Image (cartoon, rainbow, N blue to C red):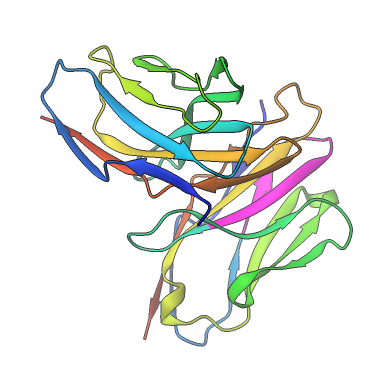
Amino acid sequence: DGGITQSPKYLFRKEGQNVTLSCEQNLNHDAMYWYRQDPGQGLRLIYYSQIVNDFQKGDIAEGYSVSREKKESFPLTVTSAQKNPTAFYLCASSALRNTEAFFGQGTRLTVV
Amino acid sequence: AQSVSQHNHHVILSEAASLELGCNYSYGGTVNLFWYVQYPGQHLQLLLKYFSGDPLVKGIKGFEAEFIKSKFSFNLRKPSVQWSDTAEYFCAVNPLNAGNNRKLIWGLGTSLAVNP
């Protein structure tokens, strides 16, 4: 079954700790994206990657980091520098010439 | 900067009522257009898309949208909503040849509640 897998679904962390959210896709898509979804603010782009070993900052990259060592994987690290990390995080991917994005189930991160 | 505006933030309808959700974008060039839906507790999924051709596109579950280039609009419609259409709806635009070909610009979403 092709798709995007985000894990875990729920994540709790103490303030000041870094946390890494997993995103894996088996759709053979070149591009992958991380979004943050907050109530009333829609989807805001954190980082995106169009090819392995390359990624670009989105609109709200501060306090986040990513890597793209494999085509299938695009993990997101929420660092202690992110001032308001509690949110719903969505990973997506799209093919090279088609901007239709496919989404994972999301990870709800709560920092206490 | 490119932007997408969804005029209705919250919509409440009774079953069988007709639905129209507005979406306007600011970009004068060629665009790809999308409507996504997020049902409660589920992931975002594509409702319909427009790349080229017939400006009236039909999607899943009886939804359709019309691209009106002169109005920079891509409004979503459904003649008769059901309780199961309760969800959040997002309009997204990909402005082609704008230097960021792979990035979607998102509206803030419209929350639709359908009363049985």
Residue at image x 66%, y 52%?
B34
Q: Residue B21 appears at what percent x and percent y?
A: 59, 63
For this view, does B90 lie left or right of residue B24?
A: left
Relative to B40, say whether B14 is above or below: below
Q: Which residues are magenta?
A: B22-36
Query: Total number of numbered labels?
Result: 0
In the displayed orientation, state which residue is furthest to the top. A81
For this view, does A58 lie left or right of residue B62?
A: left
For this view, does A5 lie left or right of residue B71?
A: left
Q: Residue A2 appears at what percent x and percent y?
A: 53, 52
Instruction: Tell me the quadrant of the picture where the C terminus of chain B can be found.
Output: bottom left
Q: Residue A32 appears at what percent x and percent y?
A: 55, 32
Location of residue B99 (image quadrant): top right
A84 vs B69, nearest the viewer: A84
Q: Is residue A19 visible?
A: yes
In the displayed orientation, state which residue is furthest to the right. B53
For this view, does B35 lie left or right of residue A84?
A: right
Q: Residue B54 appears at what percent x and percent y?
A: 87, 63
Q: Is residue B112 visible?
A: no
Relative to A34, say whether B40 is above or below: below
Instruction: Tell me the quadrant of the picture where the N terminus of chain B can be found.
Output: top right
Judge whether residue B5 is colored magenta: no
A69 vs A78, nearest the viewer: A69
Residue at image x 86%, y 52%?
B52
Residue at image x 35%, y 63%?
B40
Judge whether residue B31 is colored magenta: yes
